[in-house]
Image: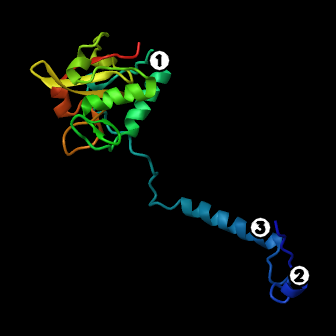
């Protein structure tokens, strides 16, 4: 590595070290004190009324929307599933797709995430996923990585991965992308058919 040497004699004419040009330490301290006093004086400006923060808005959460935090049986595995699922948000929807390169349909997303992160092999369709062994979960007791199902008239037509705080990741439809939605959204609330826990 090369070293750079500066000849101080050549730079002295351009950068003289005169005492007159540099403020003294006492002078700098005086300016700092004056600035501090000015700021303290200005902080009192405001029209004479005390400034208060607004109180928090009244909660609009209905009791059925308040979800307790349910700890997964295997937090590390659930976390891996959730992080991978969220990482795929924005991937294009493709009917029959089951990889990030090809795109995903709803069940392709679910089977890919569990296989990729945990080497868990799940059935391929949303109906088959809904029929797997495992406890049916009360919607207020969902844990991260639970599977959530949707449909009409009792028929399961769609599946997603619950990620916590009332949200789930899914691949919704042709022309869309993998996205994060809320279970309490009107469309999904009306079509919710249940949940299953894969990680036990």
Tell me: residue 87, above or below residue 140.
below
* Residue in the image at 89% along x and 81% along y: 8
Between the residue at mark 1 and the residue at mark 3, the CA separation in whole angstroms equals 59 Å
Comparing marks 1 and 2, which lies closer to the viewer?
A: 1
Kindly state the secondary structure of the residue where label 1 is placed.
Answer: loop
* Whole-percent x, y for residue 91 in the image: 32, 43
Q: Nearer the viewer, residue 51 or 96?
A: 96
Comparing marks 2 and 3, which lies closer to the viewer?
A: 2
* Label 2, residues with CA under 10 Å away: few <14, some 14-19, many ≥20: few
Q: On the image, which quarter does residue 6 sit in?
A: bottom right
Dots 1, 2 in contact, CB < 8 A: no
* Label 3, residues with CA under 10 Å away: few <14, some 14-19, many ≥20: few
Comparing marks 1 and 3, which lies closer to the viewer?
A: 1
Left or right: residue 40 versus residue 84 is: right
Between the residue at mark 1 and the residue at mark 2, the CA separation in whole angstroms equals 67 Å
Q: On the image, which quarter does residue 20 sit in?
A: bottom right
Residue at the far right: name it.
9
Tell me: residue 172, above or below residue 128.
below
- The quadrant of the image that shows the C terminus is top left
Q: How is the image coloured?
A: rainbow
According to the image, label 1 marks what residue?
Answer: 74
- Numbered label attached to residue 29: 3
* Whole-percent x, y for residue 18 in the image: 86, 84
* Whole-percent x, y for residue 154 in the image: 12, 18
Kindly state the secondary structure of the residue where label 3 is placed.
Answer: helix
- Numbered label attached to residue 8: 2
Q: Nearer the viewer, residue 143 or 154?
A: 154
- Numbered label attached to residue 187: none
């Amino acid at each position: 590595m090369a070293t750079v040497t500066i000849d101080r004699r050549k730079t002295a004419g351009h950068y003289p070290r005169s005492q007159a040009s540099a403020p003294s330490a006492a002078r700098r301290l005086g300016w700092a004190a004056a600035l501090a006093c000015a700021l303290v004086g200005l902080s009192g400006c405001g029209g004479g009324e005390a400034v208060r923060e607004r109180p928090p808005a009244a909660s609009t959460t209905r009791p059925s929307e308040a979800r307790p935090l349910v700890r997964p049986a295997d937090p590390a595995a659930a976390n891996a599933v959730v992080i991978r699922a969220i990482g795929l948000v924005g991937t294009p929807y493709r009917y029959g797709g089951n990889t990030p390169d090809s795109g995903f349909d709803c069940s392709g997303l679910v089977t890919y995430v569990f296989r990729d992160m945990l080497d868990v092999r799940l059935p391929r369709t949303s109906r088959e996923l809904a029929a797997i062994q495992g406890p049916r979960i009360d919607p207020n007791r969902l844990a991260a990585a639970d599977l959530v199902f949707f449909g009409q008239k009792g028929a399961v037509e769609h599946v997603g991965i619950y990620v916590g705080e009332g949200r789930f990741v899914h691949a919704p439809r042709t022309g869309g992308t993998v996205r994060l939605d809320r279970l309490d959204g009107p469309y999904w609330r009306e079509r919710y058919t249940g949940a299953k826990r894969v990680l036990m």
